[in-house]
Amino acid sequence: MDASSLSISIDQPSSLPPYEQLHAAVVEAVRTGRAAPGTKLPTVRALAEQLGLAVNTVAKAYKALEADGVVEGRGRNGTFVAEHGDPAERALQAAAADYAALAKRLGVEASAARSIVAAALDAG
């Protein structure tokens, strides 16, 4: 995953500090499902390079995101989008992420994949 897949860009002339812009962009990516629970985020160094920011700026945003419960640091393994919601919702989110990955691997269009899920839900 990189900044482009998260739709993150930093508006340098903005009055909002870059770390707050980054924080808001990651929160929005999680809220909209572009970054599902368990998604590994880029390393601090890699994201800083991609966005043209100082490493400390990205680290500050990641620390704030972790304090807010949006992401979780797993030491040397990296930073991941935190699991959220009730256990049933988390299980469905994980299944949906697996299904989406399978659909992409098989070359199935998103609209067709959604139709398949809708038909399965209607049949249930």
Image (spheres, rainbow, N blue to C red):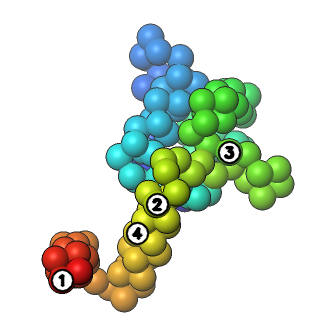
Q: Nearer the viewer, mark 4 or mark 1?
A: 1
Q: Secondary structure at mark 3?
A: strand
Residue 122: tell me if it is visible: yes
Residue 35, image x and y in percent? 47, 53
State the mark number for residue 96: 4
Residue 91 appears at what percent x and percent y? 49, 65
Does 22 appear above or below 46? above
Q: Are marks 2 and 1 in contact (CB under 8 Å)?
A: no
Circle 3 sits on which residue?
A: 72
Label 4: how many residues lie within 10 Å, few (<14), some (14-19) or many (20+)?
Answer: some
Question: What residue is drawn where x is 52% and y is 47%?
Answer: 84
Q: Are marks 4 and 1 in contact (CB under 8 Å)?
A: no
What residue is shown at x 36% (from left), y 88% (from top)? 106
Residue 122 screen position, x and y as percent: 16, 77
The tag on residue 88 is 2
What's the CA distance linking mark 4 and mark 3? 21 Å
**Residue for badge 1:** 123
Please say if the residues under marks 4 and 3 sit with CB atoms less than 8 Å apart. no
Q: Nearer the viewer, residue 14 or 108?
A: 108
The amino acid at mark 1 is: Ala
For badge 3, the amino acid type reads Glu
